[in-house]
Image (cartoon, rainbow, N blue to C red):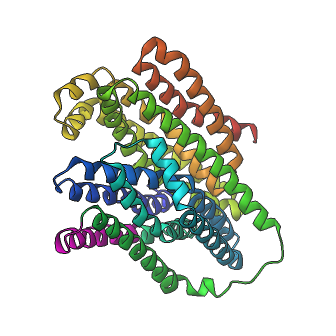
Amino acid sequence: MNKRDHQILKIALPAIVTNITVPLLGLVDTAIVGHMGSAAYIGAVAVGSMIFNLIYWVFGFLRMGTSGMTAQARGRRDFSEVSRLLVRSGWVSLTIALLIVVLQWPVRECMLWFIGPSDDVRPLAVTYFNIVVWGAPAMLSLYSLSGWFIGMQNTRIPMFVSIIQNVVNILASLTFVYGLGMKVEGVALGTVVAQYAGCLMALWFLWRYYRKVLRSWRPSSHLSPLTSYFSSNRDIFLRTLCLVAVNLYFTSAGARQGATILAVNTLLMQLYLLFSYILDGFAFAGEALGGKYWGAKDMDAYHDVVRRLFGWGALMTIIFTITYVVGGTLFLRLLTDEPQVVEASQAYVWWAYLIPVAGVAAFIWDGLFIGTTQTRGMLVSSAIAALVFFGTATIAIGIMGNHGLWLAMILFLAVRGIVQTIIVKSEK
């Protein structure tokens, strides 16, 4: 393992820990409401969490757009621009958060109409939403701060912040629910408290370790950096809409095939998420290191980062493929003890074996494209892959049933990576 591998792992490992701890926020909430004596509470938190996951996912460009530009500015040692990027991203995140808060009623009603919860779940989901929506400024600010930290080659701070959020969320929710006798509103309030605690801790780390960089801030009269910032974020935003559309269709198409198939697809997607948590860590390394060397115009170092990242991606692909083939069924049995679901999953589990091979290139290239702010390539690849997905699903589901849906998803993952590779090769 050489110096470059150490650089990659120094960024990737804390990012992987962060990715793994993020879902714990939702798991803690689910565990608490699961002991309230009614399935409606579980449904309300599930619906509410889904709404905010979709909203925040769409605005993920606040993190991705910030990280690549910050890494490049750092590579050029333009610390005035580094500080301007943080301020710029911060103002955009707060503006979007304010709009979400102001427009919370139409946002809530549109999302609830789309999801369609039952009559006993809906009022509880409304209560959850009405409280958690006030955490939007903290959450979107954290997106900007996390992207900036990653661009500064520091994934340890987001990791610490994520851990702190989880601890605060557990303590606050338990206090509100069991100490103060609250129900779903206690869980929602605990989530908001954790979000602001994480944001405040990130700001403290920012001031503690980067105040010299912040003091280098100077206003800029040039419009080109601002234009580039919004152009990059526009591409990432539209690319994210492609991913959201595919995932929503995948879920709804599974649901139309019955509760058992929906449950099977949900369980198998956990294998995809597990792989994505690990590969995203290496994608973050691509954002940070790729952006740094691209900004410094050190192309030898950049290409070495690319080779090393794909080497790590190949290793992870081999490990996960073997793990899924050997222990995939056992993992599914750990997630559910419902005999019908476990039995039905046996016909489809082999699709999960293809996830690492199909998805590895897309994850690695995404990180490198973000780092070098070649976001148009991400948008083009995602749009083409989405067209392939919808075209395949439309034809194959009628012929192959749920196998056709999984074929479409595997092709979606693979096409993204293939198109991105073609784009890179064509530019050489």
Report the residue that reaches farthest toward the top.
Answer: 399
Q: Does 106 lie within the magenta span?
A: no
Left or right of residue 425, residue 262 in this image:
left
Task: Tell me which residue sits at (48%, 42%) in the image.
Answer: 114
Q: Position of residue 194 (x, y in %)?
A: 36, 71
Is residue 114 placed above or below 352 in the rendered structure? below
Task: Tell me which residue sits at (39%, 54%) in the image.
Answer: 48
State the quadrant of the N terminus: bottom left
Task: Tell me which residue sits at (55%, 20%) in the image.
Answer: 394
Query: Which stretch is magenta?
Result: 159-182
Front residue of 205/167: it is 167
Left or right of residue 407, residue 213 in this image:
right
Q: Is residue 125 visible?
A: yes
Q: Toward which corner of the image does residue 190 lie, by quadrant?
A: bottom left
Q: Toward which corner of the image does residue 251 lie, by quadrant?
A: top left
Front residue of 330/250: it is 250
Q: Toward which corner of the image does residue 25 lie, by quadrant?
A: bottom left
Q: Position of residue 328 (x, y in %)?
A: 27, 33
Q: Which SS does the magenta portion mostly show?
A: helix
Left or right of residue 96, residue 345 in this image:
left
Q: Position of residue 362 (x, y in %)?
A: 55, 41
Is residue 247 placed above or below 348 in the rendered structure? below
Q: Position of residue 13 (x, y in %)?
A: 40, 59
Q: Is residue 373 visible?
A: no
Is residue 324 placed above or below 224 in the rendered structure? above
